[in-house]
Every structure is written in C-alpha cells, then in structure tokens.
Amino acid sequence: MNADTKNLVSELRNAGFTMEAIDAAWPSWWTDDAESSPSARTELRFALARKLGLSPKPLLGERVEFVWNDEARFKHLTAQDKLQQSVLSSFGVSIGRILVRSLEKSSHSSITAGALRQAILSSSDYVDLKSLISFCWSIGIPIIHLRVFPLAAKNMHAMVVSTEGQYAILLGKDDKYPAPLAFTLAHEIGHILLGHLANTPALVDMADPGEGDADDNQEVQANEFALELLTGSPKPNIQTEIEFFSARALAESVINAGPHYKIEPGTLALCAGYVTKRWPAAIGALRHIYGQPTPLWESINNFAAQQIEWDRISIESAEYLSNIMNVANG
C-alpha cells in the first residue's frame, strides 16, 4: 500500500468508518500494480464513494463528504450519536438503494395492522419472524441483517431506507431468539405502512423500539402497529394467574396459550414480561421455548440471497452486498 492509498484509508477512518466497512467496500480488482495507475486510483475513489454514500469529487482530493449528511431521521439519538449520524445514514442509504435496485418495483398500498395480520394468518399459525420476512419479500421490501457495520459501536437496531417509493429494511441487532427481532421488524414495517418515511431517505432506530418513547408520536404509532400485527391488539390485555413465576413456568404457559390466541409463544412471553415487569423471567422463558440460541442472521441473509435478483445490479454492487451480508451472491 503506497502513500496515496494510505492517505485515502486514513481519511475514511478519520471520517468515522471502520476498517471492516472499508474492506467490504474495497473493490476486488484493486492490486498493487493498480497503485501506479492514475486512472485506477481515480476509479478506486469513485467505487468507494458509490458504496459508502460519499460524494466522489471531494474524495479525489482525499476529503470525505457525505451524500446523505443530515437527511435521515434518527430515533433515540444522543448528542454523541449525532457525530456519527452522517456515517450511518450514508452507509445505510447506499446499501438500501442497492437492495431496491435488485428487485422489480412494487406498489405498497396502505394496509392496517389488523388486515395484514389476517392475511398472514391465512397461511401461517402465527405472525412471527419468518412470516414477516416472507411477507416483506413478497411485496418487494428486501430485508437483510448487516454483518458489517460502519461504526465501531454496533448500536443500531434497525434502519428503513426509502428511495423512489420503494423501501428496504436493514437489521442491525443480533438477537438470540426470534421474538425480540420479530417485534423490531414489525415496528419497522409499521414505519413504512404508516407513512413515516415521507420526505426522508431513511429512518434509523438506534435503540430497542420495545423500550418505547412516549414523547415520539411516530414511535408510539409504530409500536402499537407492531403489537396489533403480532398479537391482534395495539394494547394487548395480558393477565397472569400468579404474581411471581419462573421462566420455565412462563414458557409452559405461553406454549399452551399461544395457539388459542394465535400469538407466537415467544411474543406472548415478552408481552407477559412487559406487563408484569418480570423481564428476566420472560427472557429466560425464550430459552425454554426455542432451545439453544441460533444465529438468526444466517437464515435471514441466506433467504435474502435467494430472493435478490443479482443480475439486476452491477458486479461491483453484488460483490459489496454479499460482503455486507456475509453470503455468496448468485
């Protein structure tokens, strides 16, 4: 790596990008021989700019300038997070736009949480993570789980990207069990179907949507949408016969009650934990419901790899996307 390339990497690192993100965006055609070619060095900068959401011309002068600097809307944002929002928004919007280009355009007519729940239940026992993912792909909303993050702190739960009336969902939090991630996904679907992305290229949930924000009307609406979609009510009335219960007892109870109410047992356990404020028991119940934790990102991204129409995007974009997803393309 010569001085010119080192300076480029240094500028990207100083702008906030992790080496992991830079490596994922670095084109495979680049070799030591290319360092001596002015045209190759120029194309390298254009390639990195396209993938990381940067303005290409400033990068030619070793200066980083973000395309989507202040346009994304962030939820649960702290002062420290604001310093990093340019990196997150440009990185995420760039990936979302690639995903959208990988599918045919679809129309997304407004649908209520209740109507969507009934549609999913017509072919599934519950509204769960798997059925939500299948629904999104069926209407042209791609979903992937990020395996490469632009920032050292992997503190983004999820992001919805909007471009030309199309949407993509990027999941960030590594949940151990399906139910918590199902709520996050239902929440992001709510943002889309409730029209919360009007006039913004992205909406970023930095913290767990389940923690709620009573002062943010959109977050309240998205949470109620998610609850109605998953349980049938925006404010489910969950009652327990005893005040204190163990994780195992809760697991047994929701496994028995879930089919009757058409609520996935893990989701029902989380609702019970929230209402009774016995969160440790609810989280513990998930192990009894699902067994050993599994890397959910693998099934999410392997399914995505089957749904993406790789030939609709450039070889360069396909390579980058597969790096971000940690899957083989095509």
Image (cartoon, rainbow, N blue to C red):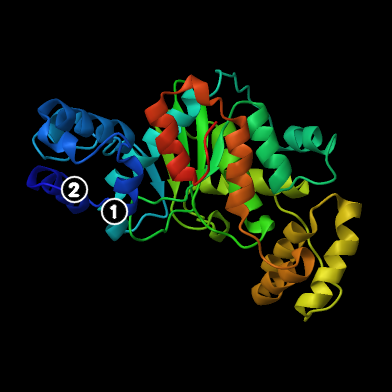
Task: State how many labels appear.
Answer: 2
Of the numbered discs in the image, which one, if any, rests on residue 161?
Answer: none
Left or right of 196: which side holds 111?
right
Q: Name the residue under label 2.
A: 9
In the displayed structure, would residue 16 be above or below residue 120?
Answer: below
Point 52% across, 35% down: residue: 329
In the displayed structure, would residue 133 be above or below residue 183?
Answer: above
Point 62% across, 63% down: residue: 176
Gap between marks 1 and 2 measured at Cα: 8 Å
Please tell me whether mark 1 sits on a helix, a strand or a loop.
helix
Q: Point out residue 8 in the picture as x, y percentages from the top left corner.
A: 15, 44
Point 18% across, 29% down: residue: 40
Of the numbered discs in the image, which one, if any, rests on residue 19?
Answer: 1
- N-terminal of the pair, mark 1 or mark 2, is 2
| Callout 2 amino acid | Val
Which corner quadrant holds the C terminus?
A: top right
